[in-house]
Image: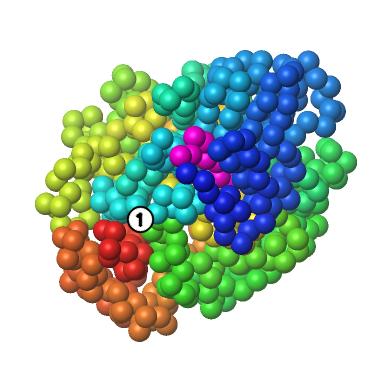
Amino acid sequence: MLGVINLSQEINPYNVMGNQETKVEQEGQHFFLRSKKDFDLYPTEIRIQIGGCEYFILLNGRIDDRDHFLQKLSLDANKNVSDTYLIGMLYQKFDLEFLKFLEGDFAFSIWDKQKNRLILAKDPIGIKNLFYCVDSGSVIWSSAIRNILHIVPDRKVNSAYIKSFLLDHPIANQSTAYENIFRLESGEFLVCENGHITKDYYYQFKIPSINYQKEEDYYQHFNQLFERSVHNRLRTPDNRVSIPLSGGVDSSSIIAMAESINKNNNWKYNIATYSIVFDEKEADERKYIKSMLDKYNLKSTIVFGDEDWNFKIDFNLLRELDEPYPLFNRALASKTLSAAKSDNISVVLTGHGGDHILHADLNYLGELLKKGKIINYIKELKQWRNKYPLHQLLKQNTLDPIFRKTRLEYPSWLKKEKFADIDLTTILTKRFEELKWDSKTITAYFNTIIRQTGHEWFDQYLSNPIGVERRYPFLDVKLMEFLAAVPPNLKIRPSNNKYIIRKSLKASLPTEIYGRTTKGNHSFLITKGFKEEWNRITEYYDFKILTELGFVNGEEIKEYCERWYMGYRYDLYNASGIMRALALEIWLSDKQDII
């Protein structure tokens, strides 16, 4: 989508989005555009009239809990109301207050002609993109930076963003790769009214107060929330969705819940599964995939991934991205998406985020002792002694969290002096060695999940170009809030992790998956990629641009790359950060004039 208001010069809106077929509405010098592919998935209108008022609404995404909103509006639950029209009706009745109870994955704009008011809003988890720029009295917004650059070209590269990008897991804050082009943040809204712009958060992550006496109540509550999350994401115009099946707990749980929902709805949804398999032993998941298919009498489209190593991509594509992104795993990551698209399925439910929200830190032992919960502490200590040495549990997981200070570290290959102006406490990274596991730390941890740019990048640069929308049942507001409040020992146990989902869905998962303690290892694709694509990597691995800018020690990165080329995998801990640096070097290679 793209919108421009109060533009001081004429533009041809049909040229803004290149060769894409678009839907355009014009009101004086105000333009509102959506690409045709958006209408294929979300058929609706841009110009809406409600009770004598006229609104221009652009929506990218999906509004959930529709029955509840229709009830608020005193409308029949079976009434055919588009999500865009629903937004307009809620806005008219509740004004800006309606933002506080919206749910779903969305980014939208409302131009209220009567009040001369523009509203931009983004979903609480930040699944959908929304960027904006204020230039020469005009406000320009879009779901893609490139659309804004068509109108205000020659933006300078934002050096502050580059620094954040080079640190592990850069967060999706308002800064973008270009100066004076901004990202609307998760749970944030912007209002432009009578020439004044204000921004605020309608949602910020919070841990609810949940304290059940029985463990079974936690499992039941989780099951209800997970069912609701999956159900919301099954809704499509043709009721067709695909779900990748890897053989892991997360993807298997989504399929199990979807099959249960489908059965209860008299098989309303057409659910297709797709699986990537490997001959490489450490990555071979066929045994677990088969157990799931057998249990539910399903068939899965099988694709092979052994030859889809990292870096098997045209590096020129990385230069053309709106922002730098390490899309080196594109060959593998696009496999199931492309297979679904070839079957004319446009929505994919992915298990992304499951590892994150179902995680807890063993340092919760220190918090138990600090709060004087001695009996609980001793009980937990006895459990974990079967897995870890007692001295480790006492020092590393109990005393250190109470008495040691948090330590923040830079990646060794970064030039520390260049980052001296960055407050690392605001950069939540893998190298953020947070010792505590208290409510403050847990809130910060979930905020890192929300503000990680992974799903934002992946959707914009991989799934959207293929023409597929990814949906994330694990990245659901209510589910995430609940899991932040769950006692840590219901998420991690010495026998296995993700305990709460295993226990909640025990009857729905094959015994092979319910009890598995291993995980497929795909790191061979990284070292294989260095071997197979070495000649192309070496064109950039001296990091000439980033070295000249003073950001990195290129020689140290070369040493890492050469070890991986030789097949060493013991130090792949640094691989994600170095591949980001490589992607950045490639992205900057044709932007020397705007650095």
User: What is the quadrant of the N terminus in the image?
Assistant: top right
Mark 1: give few (<14), some (14-19) or many (20+) Cα within 10 Å.
Answer: few
Name the foreground residue: 574 vs 404: 574
Is residue 150 rendered to the left or right of residue 21?
left
Give the farthest residue toward the right.
266
Name the foreground residue: 447 vs 89: 89
Q: What residue is drawn where x is 38% and y is 39%? A: 136
Magenta residues (range): 1-8
Q: Is residue 456 above or below residue 552?
A: above
Residue type highlighted by circle 1: Asp
Is residue 424 rendered to the left or right of residue 496?
left
Q: Position of residue 53 (x, y in %)?
A: 69, 21
User: What is the quadrant of the C terminus in the image?
Assistant: bottom left
Q: What residue is drawn where x is 39% and y is 40%? A: 135
Q: Is residue 342 above or below residue 34?
A: below
Name the foreground residue: 14 vs 108: 14
Q: Position of residue 4 (x, y in %)?
A: 52, 40
Does the magenta segment cover residue 3? yes
Q: Count up the numbered dots.
A: 1
